[in-house]
Image (cartoon, rainbow, N blue to C red):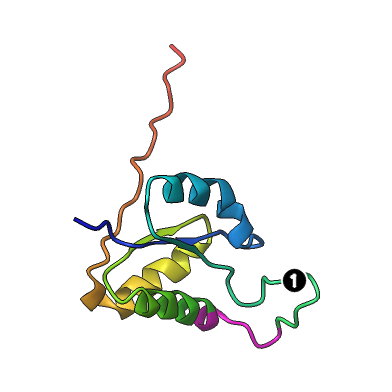
Amino acid sequence: MKAAPIILVPGFWLGAWAWDQVEAILRSQDHRVRSLTLPGLETLEDNRSAVSLTSHIDAICDALLEAVEPAVLAVHSAAGFSGYAASDRMPEHGLRRHRPRERRPESRL
């Protein structure tokens, strides 16, 4: 059985390069992986005046469509807003939301 493709989206101010080590590990295990750099974050010199949350959501949705089959979408930090919006926009892709369990503060008593 073929594993689902994996799309990795870094947090704000990061690019696809932030996933390089993770991507290498996943590829070594025969996973199909694609890392995104969200619009406006390609270079420091980019003109970001027309970039919006919708631009980021569109980029994630485009990557999901290019994957053809349902994919695993992993978003980091503030890119979670765009990731959740993309999953709302594309329910037919069967994206499920997972939030890590919250840690409880340790008792100091």
* Residue 50 within the segment the image draws in magenta: yes
Classify residue 100 by image quadrant. Answer: top left
Q: Which residues are magenta?
A: 49-55
In this rendering, the count of numbered labels is 1
Question: Measured from the top left, where is residue 33 in percent x and y?
Answer: 43, 60
Residue located at (81% from left, 75% from top): 45
| The N terminus, quarter of image | bottom left
Residue located at (62% from left, 83% from top): 51
Circle 1: residue type: Thr
Classify residue 103 by image quadrant. Answer: top left
Work out whether residue 85 or residue 46 is closer to the camera in this orientation and state it: 46
Residue located at (37% from left, 54% from top): 31
* Residue 23 within the segment the image draws in magenta: no
Residue topped by disc 1 = 43
User: Is residue 33 placed above or below 49 in the rendered structure?
Assistant: above
Classify residue 41 by image quadrant. Answer: bottom right
Question: Measured from the top left, where is residue 68 in percent x and y?
Answer: 31, 77
Question: Measured from the top left, where is residue 70 in percent x and y?
Answer: 27, 69
Q: Does 77 sit left or right of 89 as displayed?
A: right
User: Is residue 86 placed above or below 2 in the rendered structure?
Assistant: below
